[in-house]
Amino acid sequence: MNNILKTTFLLSLLTILLVAMGGAVGGQGGMIVAFLMAAVMNFGSYWFSDKIVLKVYNAQEITHEVHPSFYDMIERLAGRAGLPMPKVYIIPHDSPNAFATGRNPAHAAVAAPIAAMLIQMAVSRSREYLADTSGSEICGRPLALATRTH
């Protein structure tokens, strides 16, 4: 099952659950209100989830002029993966939790903490191992991804 199908299935399941709860609480009117709420939440999740997560992490967009080596690395990896250049952000946290977000490659963003500046291609635990494999192939230096720096 591909990721789009999984996402559609989960959002549909959550919508059905919310509508059922609305019906249990408010009858037919509650179902309608719950359906409208689910539609707004699904729309917002699809169009604005990247902006929300970047805001939560207080991410700051950077350019090539601000941090050329990091920007060049992202540009090189995107090129090797055959993807358009994402927006690049720095997050002011010491955690090594880097992430990629966006609804599609044309609206993608990559964010990394200032301390680590590592790129993780995984966006969920279910795809973590596949993402690590893909990341090592795209990087061209798989052992560099496996090496921890202190």
Image (cartoon, rainbow, N blue to C red):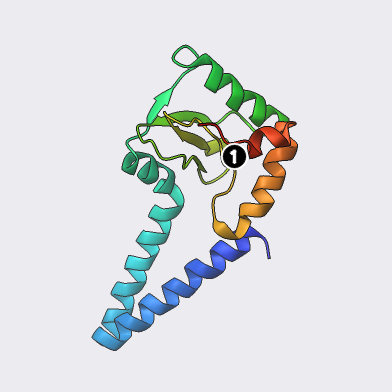
Q: Position of residue 138 (x, y in %)?
A: 72, 35
Disc 1 residue crowd, few under 14, some 14–19, many 20+, Cα 10 Å: some
Single out the residue that lies furthest toward the left: 26
The type of residue carrying mark 1 is: Pro
Task: Give the SS element for disc 1.
Answer: helix
Place residue 72 in its image quadrant: top right
Residue appearing at x 59%, y 65% in the figure: 6
Q: Position of residue 65 (x, y in %)?
A: 47, 11
The quadrant in which residue 37 appears is bottom left
Q: Residue 93: x and y, percent? A: 36, 36
Name the residue tied to disc 1.
105
Task: Locate the N terminus and report the quarter of the image it occupies.
Answer: bottom right
Left or right of 109? Residue 48 is left
Say left or right for 111 vs 130: left
Decide if residue 81 is in sight here. Answer: no
Q: Determine whether, in the image, residue 26 is placed left or right of residue 84.
A: left
Residue at x 36% of width, y 76% of height: 18
> Residue 15 or 56: which is nearer the viewer?
56
Q: Nearer the viewer, residue 87 or 70?
A: 70
Residue sitting at 27 percent across and 80 percent down? 30
Q: Nearer the viewer, residue 116 or 2?
A: 116
Q: Is residue 87 above or below residue 44?
A: above
Question: Which residue, as the protein is rendered here, is positioned at the far top?
Answer: 65
What residue appears at the point 46 percent right and 42 percent down from the top-left corner?
97
Rendered view: 11 above or below 114? below
**Residue 68 in the image, given as x and y percentages of width and height:** 52, 15
On screen, residue 63 versus residue 146, left or right, reads left
